[in-house]
Amino acid sequence: MKTDIKADRKVDKKEILTVENLVKHYGSDENLVRAVDHTSLTIERGKFTAIVGRSGSGKSTLLHLIGGLDRPDKGIVRIAGTDIFSLKDDRLAEFRRKKIGFIFQDYNLIPSLNVWENVVLPLGLDNRKVNSGEVNAVLERIGLTEKKEAMPNVLSGGQKQRTAIARALVARPAIILADEPTGNLDSQTELEVMSLLKSCVTDFGQTLVMITHDEMIAQMADRVIEVEDGKVVNN
């Protein structure tokens, strides 16, 4: 069976992500929470976009919907031209593996796998051939060449996050989504990791959408989108 996922419409060369009238509510009546409330936005290919907002503003829920980790009550999310919520669960999971890279605050590394194995894991799960040259190039750029056989338990927080970044880059997704990726790092390591991530996104031609509460990080972005009460209020 052919498993390639193709765009379901002609893709604008500039836009990689389109969100149309996205809604996600929890509870009912007086307990109703409008986590994402009729939100629309577009993201250009090759840009670093920061999504900011106070705690509880809905920014993390929005990112999870964009990444297909949760389904909305209504609305459309298109990535590289594909309406991701038109896909059944198994096809959506396949799409996530192929087209979306995730970087989380808690790294999500597999403790029993070394750095190299963690980095190439998404390729193996998708039965894609590992290009050792490309992987080594990413590890060198990310500063992990000497750590590729190290296990996660001997890595610093910064090295763990670099591993997670390398894992996202090696898969060559259409878009990378990051949820407070430096939240567990000290301020100096945070700055080093963010500078490295931004330069790698540029070097490898990736699109990055990042949730952050850190004004310094937001200032590094090409564009800042502010979310308040589940709505985009400034972009």
Image (cartoon, rainbow, N blue to C red):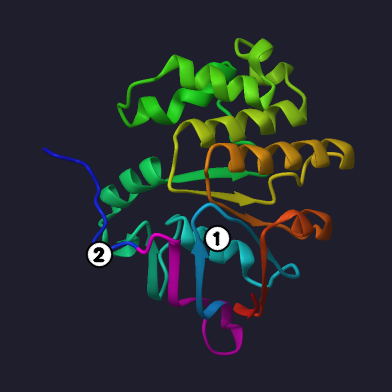
Magenta stretch in the rendered image: 12-35
Position of residue 60 relative to residue 27, above or below, is: above
Which one is nearer the viewer's eye here, 63 or 14? 14
Position of residue 55 relative to residue 103, above or below, is: below
State yes or no: residue 15 in magenta: yes
Return the mark for residue 63: 1
Picture coordinates of residue 197 (x, y %)? 67, 40
Picture coordinates of residue 33 (x, y %)? 59, 79
Return the mark for residue 9: 2
Return the mark for residue 73: none
* Residue count near mark 2 (Cα–Cα under 10 Å), binned few <14, some 14–19, many ≥20: few
Q: Circle 2 sits in a helix, a strand or a loop, which is it?
A: loop
**Horizontal side, residue 46 vs residue 235: left or right:** left
Kind of residue indicated by mark 1: Leu
Residue at 51% from the left image edge and 61% from the top image edge:
44
Residue 161 visible to the viewer: yes
Position of residue 172 relative to residue 100, above or below, is: above
Which one is nearer the viewer's eye here, 15 or 85? 15
Residue at 24% from the left image edge and 51% from the top image edge:
6
Position of residue 225 relative to residue 215, above or below, is: below
